[in-house]
Structure formats: structure tokens, C-alpha cells
Image (cartoon, helix red, strand yellow):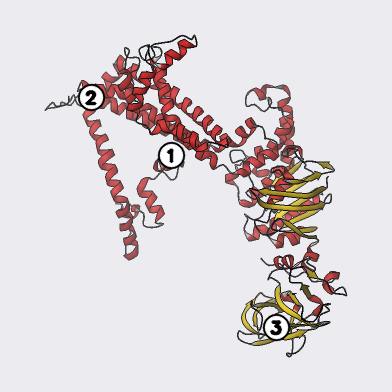
């Protein structure tokens, strides 16, 4: 059991900054996900936590102990790799036993022939075998113990990798995109298993992924990373409904949030896309703002006019219960995507002109530098309690 | 080189050039038109594919027959005669040449010497090649330089290098003996002493093949995924010996197998150093198979006998390769 404290962490490779001023507290037993696109530094952060990489600056402590300069094996953390990193020449049992053998047997006892002759070797070896079998049983891979990794399916390898991490009861589990080598169906299944594993073990999990569905479904909190910076750390629903800045809003959510340029006409009224929306905003008349509107914040309106946006349908995607409608709007460069309930918008066809109403309390406002402009009254989004999370389709 | 790797690397793939080609084309393997296979009538595109397969595989197949299979058959036939080079009417003598080969003391010494030579050169080359590759890979600077330096002997003409070795090993003015005597160590007449000549030739053999082994090991080291080393670190195998045993050596298995086989074959074929430096002497103490073969066939002109030696040599080499490939293949590919 251990919490993880990261203070002001920095890292650069050959003058390219990979991490800057990353500070993060992970509570004991928490499931925290580092979410970000590839190359954002999340894997580097994880490797620093594991002790595989040395930070340029800052400090890491695990379970109240500063571990800077402590070797990976003495940190009592376990890591599951994207490639699983199983030793191909060892059987599943040997793979899982290795961390225990390295810790409990002396170098002499591990020697091939000599080791077997030493008195304690056999007893410790038997203990290890029992523990490996128990762990394998818990993961449902007991029947695979004699196989080599090459003879296993992706999902089975994944379980073996988890088993190898679990077998020595680490206080912190680090997982580096453990599901990205699996097919979509298996990924959903393993996602549930990892969640269950976390619940059962009750230890701290730090999970790296670029997949928001994984981040949203698994985590207690999500830390969104971009270009080496930690942008926001919050529970999944808050990340979605109340992003701290534009980059977070754009990264999280699928389909992507619509960004519309607007100009404040007067207190509480914003001109956007040839229309005007009544939005609770402070600001001088003429100030430029960005309106972030999630696709599901739209609804079909009866007529054009204030409070509604008008667009021409460019594309309709049927998703079963929902329709994703792509629209061209005057004064908006990119297509606006609206997610409408299929039953409410049955006859939308390409080329049709559609009026969309917008729930003002669901509009997120951003300044031109990307920072969030908070409404004067807390919006529905900020209170988060009744916010539909939406579905994170990949 | 790649062709050789393919042949050794995996069981089911061992179908030769024609099979490979068929696989590449997905359909239309040459088997489809072989007599005896299920008689299928070939139409349009299928026929075209089959023709293309044959057209592509054909030249290599033909060359294989002309340059390899036919000469081997010819040698085997010659081995059954008493033909002497230039003689007009060779006589069929059955297995007499083989009887003579196996009862010949000279041949047995030659075979024994070759074995000793191989048994020194192969482990020496593999261990030293691996060591140098590990050292180069672990160092940060001058990598390219070290690689080039160690690879040079493999590239250089051994005949020329042998002369340099002869100078080095000269009993009085050679650098080796001068250095040894300066250090107060015993000297020897390296190439004229029955006890030292074979080990010295083996050392030259190691020196020559080292670069080859090293380059392959370097390539092998590069292809080991970093994840495995990371996993080993976290699992606690972070001392150099543990890393070597847990990750490096097992992952180098396929490369090592290839190096062992190729170096063993090259060692079996040792000839030029013997020819230039010792001519098999002193006595028969540095006589090796290929040298015996050469002398019998081209100096004594006993072509029939030489052909018999060739066949024995071929059988040994092929058998050794097959045994190694079969035995090691299973152990290094972790299937």
C-alpha cells in the first residue's frame, strides 16, 4: 500500500523537453490514468516512476519514501508493458517466478547446477512454485503454466504479464498501454478485468493510455497530459464536462468538441455563426471568444433565430440510437458535428438545412489563449452531478 | 547469407527456392503442375500464375542443378573409379577408394586434426565474437572504429594475411618471439613445432572469423527489445550477469546458432593458411581434410581417391549442419 508523490518533475532528452514541472499526488489505492496523445511524455513519466529512467529535475516518493536514485527493483513497483515483455525462452511459470527467484534466492542459489545442490534452494523454489500457481489460478491461466509465450494468444500473454507483476505483491502497479496490442473486443473484456483486479488488490494503479475510453471507464481520476505538461487532473466526468482549458476539451470526447469563433455583442449575448446565443458571459462588447459545444449539446430546433444555429447537412452517420450529423455553418471553417437522438431527428438528409438549438448552460467558453472563461453562475456542466457523460466511442 | 539463414531458421519453411516462390505468390506453386499431383486442369489465370512461378524459380533451379547437383553426382561417380587425372580409361573399382580412405593412417590424422581445429575455432570465435560485440555495444565512443577494426581480418585476403602471420611467427626475427623473450617468457618455433602448429593455425582461424561473428552478434544485440531489459530491471535481474542470462544470451539464440554453423563450416574448409604456412607439416601434424583432398587430387593426381575424400568431407559437413540445425533450431526459437 503506497501513495505516490511527484513533485516538479522535469526531463529532457538532448535538449528536447519531454516533461516539465509535473506535479501529481496519487492517493493510496487510487486508479489514476495518464491520458494523452503519443509523444506527450506520459510513458516517460511512468518510466521515471518505475526507476527505468532518471528524471532531470524534481522528486518522486512512493509510500512516503523518496525513491530518487533507488533502483527499479527496490521500489516495490511492478510494471506491465505494452509489448508484455515476456521472456520468450521461459515458460509461463518461469516468467512469473522470475521476480520471486531474483528476490528470494541468492546469486549462488540461482546458478544452474550448483544452485540446485544448495540446501535452501529446493524449499524456496517450492514456495515460489506454490505462489505462482496461486496467482495463475486467480488469473485463470493455471493451465498455461508449462507453455512458452509464443504459444499463447494476445489476451493470455496479457494475463501472464499481469501475473508476473502481481506475484510479488507490489504496492504500486504501473501499466503502460497494456491493452493497445489487443483487438477491440478483447480490449473491452480485459478493461473490465483490470478494473476488477484493481478492486480486488486495492493497491495503487497508475495507468498510461492514449485511449480515452480506457481512461474514462477505468479511472478514479484522469491526468491529461500534452506536450510534457499536466493540463488537468480530475475525475473522468469532470474532465469531460468541465475541462480546464481548450486543449483538454479538444482531446477528450468523441466526436470531438465543436469549436466556434464568437464575438461578445453585449453582456450575456454572443454572436456566432450568423446567429446569437444567450450565454452568461462577462466581457466587453467586441471581445473574441471560442465557444466549445459538445455534439450532444445540440438539439433540433423548430425555427431559426436567436438561440439556434443554422447549417446545411453534409454527412449523416447512423450510430443506432444516435445520429452524428455533420453540418456546414456560415462563418465556421470546420464542419460542426451534432449528436442527435435518432428518434427526435428521423428525416435528416444530406443537403437539408437544419436549425439546431444549443443548451446555453452546456457551452464552454475559452479565451483566445485557450484558457477557460468561467461563467458567473455555475453552469450545469460545472456542477457535473447530472451531466451525461456521453459515450466514448473510439 | 540470408538464404542460408532461411534454410536453417525454421522447419516448415525448408522447401527451397521453388517452395518459397510459390508461397510468395500465394497460389500457383510449382507443385500444381508436377506429375503425380492431383491432376487438375489449369485454366487462364491459374495457369499463368503457375508459369510465372516456374519462370521465376526456373533459373535458380537450373543453376542449382548445373552448379551443385551434377558436380556432386560426378564426384560420386569418379569416387567409384580408379581414375587418375589425365588417364584415358578409368576403371570401375566399387567402394575400393572408400576402403582405402578409412584404412589410411594419413586420412585419419587429417580428420582428427580438422576436428581439433574446428573444436578450437568455433568456441573461440563465438565466445570472443560475443564478448567484443558486448563490449562495443556497451561502450559509447568509437563504436564504428572498433567495428571496422575487428571486421577487417574477415574482409582481408587470407593469403596476404598469412604472410604477415608468418613474419610475426618467425622463430628468430618474428615479433611474437621477440616480445615473449623480452618478457622473459619461453619462445617456440610456432609453425615448425608439432605441438604448437595446430593451435597456432586455430588462433589465426579465430582471428579471421572473429569479425564475422562480431558483426552478427552486434546485429542480434540491436534487435533485442529494450522492454525486455526494462522488465528484467523491474523483476530484479539488473546485475550484468543476470541481465546476460535472463535476456541477452537467450535472445541471441538464433544468431548464435547461425554463427556456430557458419563458423563451423568455414573452419572445416580451412585450407589457405595450411597451404601457405605449413603445407600440412611438420610431419602430418597440421594436415587437414581439405589439404589432403587437394594434395591427393591435384599433386598426386589420384582423382578417384580425392573424390572419395571429397564425398566423406561432404557427408560430414552436411550431417553436422543438419544435426546442428535440427537440434539447435528447437532450442533457440522458443516455440
* Closer mark to the observer between disc 1 and disc 2: 2
Residue B131 visible (yes or no)? yes
**Quadrant occupied by the C terminus of chain A:** bottom right
Q: Residues within 10 Å of mark 2 (few under 14, many from 20)?
A: many
For residue A141, above or below residue A377: above
Pointers 3 and 2 in contact (CB under 8 A)? no
- The residues bearing labels 1 and 3 have C-alpha atoms spaced at a distance of 68 Å
Q: Are marks 3 and 2 on the same chain?
A: no
Of all chains, the one bearing label 1 is B
Measured as percent of width and height from the top left, residue B29 is found at 36, 54
From the image, which quarter does the N terminus of chain A lie in? top right
Q: Considering the numbered disc 3 on the image, is that residue within a helix, a strand or a loop?
A: loop
Query: Would residue A13 be found to the left or right of residue B200 on screen?
Result: right
In the displayed structure, would residue B94 be above or below residue B67?
Answer: above
Q: Which residue is mark 1?
A: B8
Residue topped by disc 2 = B297
Q: Which residue has dot 3 on it?
A: A273
Where disc 2 sits, the SS reads helix
Identify the residue shown where x is 43% and y is 26%.
B207
Give the camera-side residue of B323 and B209. B209
Determine contact: label 1, label 3, CB under 8 Å: no
Query: Share a chain, discs 1 and 2?
Result: yes
The chain that hosts pointer 3 is: A
Callout 1: SS: helix
Which x, y percent locates residue A107? 69, 27
For the point 64% across and 60% down, which residue is it? A184
Residue A36, position as x, y percentages in the image:
70, 59
Amino acid at each position: 500500500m503506497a501513495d505516490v508523490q511527484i513533485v516538479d518533475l522535469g526531463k529532457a532528452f538532448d535538449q528536447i523537453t519531454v516533461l516539465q514541472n509535473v506535479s501529481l499526488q496519487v492517493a493510496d489505492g487510487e486508479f489514476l490514468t495518464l491520458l494523452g496523445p503519443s509523444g506527450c511524455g506520459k510513458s516517460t513519466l511512468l518510466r521515471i516512476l518505475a526507476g527505468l529512467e532518471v528524471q532531470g529535475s524534481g522528486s518522486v516518493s512512493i509510500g512516503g519514501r523518496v525513491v530518487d536514485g533507488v533502483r527499479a527493483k527496490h521500489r516495490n513497483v511492478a510494471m506491465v508493458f505494452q509489448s508484455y515483455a515476456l521472456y520468450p525462452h521461459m515458460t509461463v511459470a518461469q516468467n512469473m517466478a522470475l521476480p520471486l527467484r531474483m528476490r528470494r534466492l541468492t546469486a549462488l542459489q540461482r546458478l544452474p547446477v550448483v544452485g540446485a545442490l544448495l540446501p535452501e534452494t529446493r524449499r524456496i523454489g517450492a514456495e515460489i512454485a506454490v505462489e505462482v500457481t496461486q496467482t495463475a489460478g486467480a488469473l485463470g491461466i493455471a493451465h498455461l503454466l508449462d507453455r512458452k509465450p509464443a504459444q499463447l494468444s494476445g489476451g493470455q500473454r496479457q494475463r501472464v504479464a499481469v501475473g508476473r507483476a502481481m506475484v510479488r505483491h507490489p504496492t504500486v502497479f504501473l501499466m503502460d498501454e497494456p491493452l493497445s496490442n489487443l483487438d477491440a473486443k478483447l480490449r473491452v473484456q480485459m478493461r473490465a478485468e483490470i478494473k476488477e483486479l484493481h478492486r480486488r488488490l486495492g493497491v495503487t494503479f497508475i495507468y498510461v493510455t492514449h485511449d480515452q475510453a480506457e481512461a474514462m471507464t477505468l479511472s478514479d481520476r484522469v491526468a491529461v497530459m500534452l506536450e510534457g505538461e499536466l493540463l488537468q487532473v480530475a475525475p473522468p466526468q469532470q474532465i469531460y464536462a468541465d475541462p480546464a482549458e481548450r486543449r483538454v476539451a479538444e482531446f477528450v470526447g468523441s466526436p470531438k468538441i465543436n469549436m466556434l469563433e464568437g464575438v461578445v455583442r453585449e453582456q450575456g449575448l454572443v454572436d456566432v455563426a450568423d446567429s446569437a446565443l444567450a450565454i452568461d458571459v462577462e466581457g466587453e462588447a467586441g471581445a473574441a471568444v471560442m465557444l466549445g459545444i459538445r455534439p450532444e449539446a445540440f438539439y433540433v430546433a423548430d425555427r431559426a433565430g436567436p438561440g439556434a444555429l443554422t447549417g446545411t447537412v453534409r454527412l449523416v452517420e447512423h450510430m443506432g440510437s444516435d445520429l452524428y450529423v455533420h453540418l456546414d455553418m456560415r462563418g465556421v471553417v470546420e464542419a460542426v458535428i451534432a449528436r442527435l437522438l435518432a428518434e427526435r431527428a428521423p428525416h435528416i438528409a444530406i443537403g437539408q438545412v437544419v436549425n439546431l438549438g444549443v443548451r446555453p448552460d452546456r457551452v464552454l467558453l475559452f479565451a483566445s489563449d485557450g484558457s477557460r472563461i468561467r461563467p458567473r453562475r455555475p453552469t450545469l456542466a460545472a456542477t457535473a452531478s447530472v451531466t451525461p457523460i456521453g459515450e466514448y466511442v473510439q | 547469407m540470408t538464404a542460408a539463414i532461411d534454410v536453417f531458421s525454421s522447419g516448415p519453411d525448408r522447401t527451397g527456392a521453388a517452395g518459397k516462390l510459390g508461397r510468395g505468390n500465394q497460389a500457383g506453386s510449382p507443385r500444381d503442375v508436377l506429375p503425380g499431383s492431383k491432376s487438375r486442369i489449369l485454366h487462364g489465370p491459374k495457369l499463368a500464375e503457375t508459369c510465372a512461378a516456374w519462370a521465376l524459380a526456373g533459373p535458380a533451379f537450373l543453376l542449382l542443378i548445373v552448379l551443385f547437383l551434377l558436380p556432386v553426382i560426378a564426384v560420386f561417380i569418379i569416387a567409384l573409379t580408379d581414375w587418375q587425372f589425365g588417364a584415358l580409361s578409368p576403371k570401375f573399382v566399387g567402394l575400393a577408394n572408400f576402403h582405402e580412405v578409412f584404412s589410411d593412417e594419413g586420412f585419419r590424422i587429417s580428420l582428427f586434426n580438422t576436428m581439433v581445429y574446428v573444436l578450437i575455432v568455433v568456441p573461440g570465435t563465438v565466445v570472443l565474437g560475443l564478448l567484443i560485440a558486448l563490449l562495443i555495444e556497451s561502450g559509447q565512443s568509437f563504436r564504428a572504429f572498433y567495428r571496422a577494426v575487428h571486421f577487417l581480418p574477415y574482409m582481408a585476403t587470407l593469403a596476404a594475411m598469412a604472410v604477415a602471420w608468418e613474419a610475426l611467427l618467425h622463430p628468430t626475427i618474428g615479433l611474437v618471439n621477440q616480445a615473449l623473450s623480452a618478457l622473459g617468457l619461453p619462445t617456440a618455433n610456432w609453425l615448425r613445432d608439432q605441438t604448437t602448429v595446430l593451435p597456432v593455425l586455430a588462433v589465426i582461424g579465430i582471428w579471421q572469423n572473429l569479425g564475422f561473428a562480431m558483426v552478427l552478434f552486434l546485429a542480434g544485440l540491436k534487435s533485442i527489445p529494450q522492454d525486455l531489459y526494462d522488465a528484467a530491471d523491474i523483476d530484479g535481474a539488473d546485475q550484468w550477469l543476470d541481465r546476460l542470462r535472463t535476456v541477452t544470451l537467450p535472445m541471441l539464440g538464433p544468431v548464435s546458432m547461425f554463427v556456430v554453423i557458419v563458423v563451423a563450416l568455414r573452419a572445416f574448409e580451412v585450407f589457405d593458411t595450411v597451404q601457405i604456412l605449413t603445407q600440412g607439416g611438420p610431419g602430418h601434424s597440421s594436415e587437414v581434410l581439405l589439404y589432403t583432398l587437394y594434395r591427393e587430387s591435384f599433386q598426386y593426381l589420384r582423382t578417384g581417391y580425392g573424390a572419395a575424400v571429397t564425398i566423406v568431407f561432404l557427408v560430414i559437413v552436411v550431417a553436422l549442419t543438419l544435426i546442428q540445425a535440427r537440434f539447435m533450431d528447437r532450442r533457440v526459437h522458443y516455440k
